[in-house]
Image: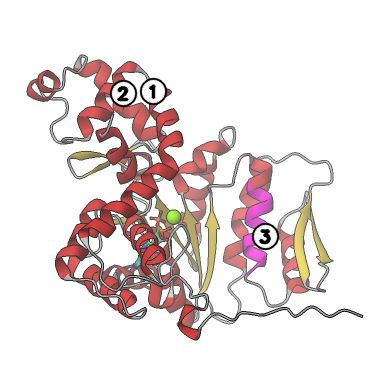
Amino acid sequence: MQFCIIEIKTLPLHKKLKMNPFSYGTIVSGNNFYDRKEECARIVKTLSGGNNLVLYAPRRFGKTSLVFKAIEQLEAQGFICVYFDFMPVFSPESFVRLYAKALAAKQNNLQKFAQLFASIIKNIRPVLSFDAAGIPEFSVDFAGSTVDETLISQLLDVPEQMNGANKRVIMFFDEFQEVEKLGSINFEGLLRSKIQQQHTTNYLFLGSKTHLLKELFNNKKRAFYNAASQMTIGALPAPDTIDFLQQKFAGSAITLDVETAKYIISVAANIPHYIQMMAAEIWQYMVNSHKIVTKKIVDDSVMRLLALKSDYYMELFDRQSQSKKQLLLALTMNGKNIFSTAYIYEHSLPSAATLQRAVKGLIADGTVEKLDDEYFIADPFFKLFLATI
Ligand SMILES: Nc1ncnc2c1ncn2[C@@H]1O[C@H](COP(=O)(O)OP(=O)(O)O)[C@@H](O)[C@H]1O
Ligand SMILES: [Mg+2]
């Protein structure tokens, strides 16, 4: 019998797999979340005080993470908080399924909830089943009936009935502008009347298509006119971001000086998501071999990220109309007063009317955002890519 000797090499302890301390593309909490104390306090105060609120800001600024922070505090005060994301909704049926699931997710006693559900909603049946791990799941059976306004209206009554034991309910509607996808149903009108009738349920509407949300809540002709107070969030304050980055890098014995931290923030256009994305990339590159973050390391990381996405960016740019292309290139330099004669002349842009249409389209698909009076390319890496062509 022959034996072979296999050498099992173990990595030295400090080289064992370490978790990247930065996190992006997901809701951040715990020590991945910093700042926003005042904003959080305002959300908690408004909702616990029985008012409704609209929170709007460009995507990736941290709305959803902030709202989850507020939910933690409101739940600690005894409120039942139901988070519902409109993004995956694509039809009235999908709304009903997802909404019912979101409500059920907050129930300790699903059996009791199914009874309540059945007593309010006549045309669909609640179904309780068990998954492979024996955990009960709630779903609905349409039993052949179509989703009409009566059904949606009854469904919107459910939160108000859930508030047993003196607990008030707060509904969090994320990406609320997507409500437009419910098209044929007059959801706006229905919800508006519920908001007026319900006394123990409050609503927070949040969304990233700022112009659509503002239109929903500020236009006198729309159902939500004046239905909620409004707030927005901006970038995270630079000194806090610098502290956060320095501390996280220090946890892996990596030094980041203030100037280089500021450089990372500026490359990421001061957008929370891109700051963490940059930091994660830099950390990954440095973790086992480098000790000090340099400007060159930041630049190299940008190049690696750009290389990864250049095909996608090229395709994104290619599929734009001529006027959108011209505008995107102009926006890499400056996004203020873009309809002025001087701007149009300087960047050889088409007429202001054509430009208006181009901007509208680019904002609608999320390529461009508007903050205060300035238009900017939503993804700073796309902007960097455009600057190279
Ligand atoms: N307060 C925060 N502290 C640290 N990182 C944050 C914070 N807010 C947002 N981020 C970063 O931005 C990313 C996007 O946040 P998210 O809450 O999903 O934004 P939005 O809902 O506005 O699109 C997060 O994954 C995280 O990397
Ligand atoms: Mg979000």
Residue designated by label 2: 325
SS assignment for the magenta stretch, majority: helix
Q: Is residue 387 left or right of residue 77?
A: left
Instruction: Give the percent coordinates (x, y) of residue 75.
Output: 49, 78
User: Quadrant location of the N terminus?
Assistant: bottom right
Residue designated by label 1: 320
**Reading the chain from its start, which is encountered first: label 2 or label 3?**
3
The residue range painted magenta reads 95-105
**Residue beneath the point at 46% across and 76% down:** 72
Name the amino acid type tagged 1: Gln
Q: Give the quadrant of residue 31.
A: bottom left
Name the amino acid type tagged 3: Lys
Specify whether residue 364 is in view: yes
Q: What's the distance in space between the residues labelled 1 and 3, CA to CA?
A: 39 Å
**Residue beneath the point at 72% across and 62% down:** 117
Does the Cβ of the disc 2 residue fall within 8 Å of ligand 1? no
Q: What's the distance in space between the residues labelled 1 and 2, CA to CA?
A: 6 Å
Which class describes the residues within 10 Å of circle 1: few (<14), some (14-19), or many (20+)? some
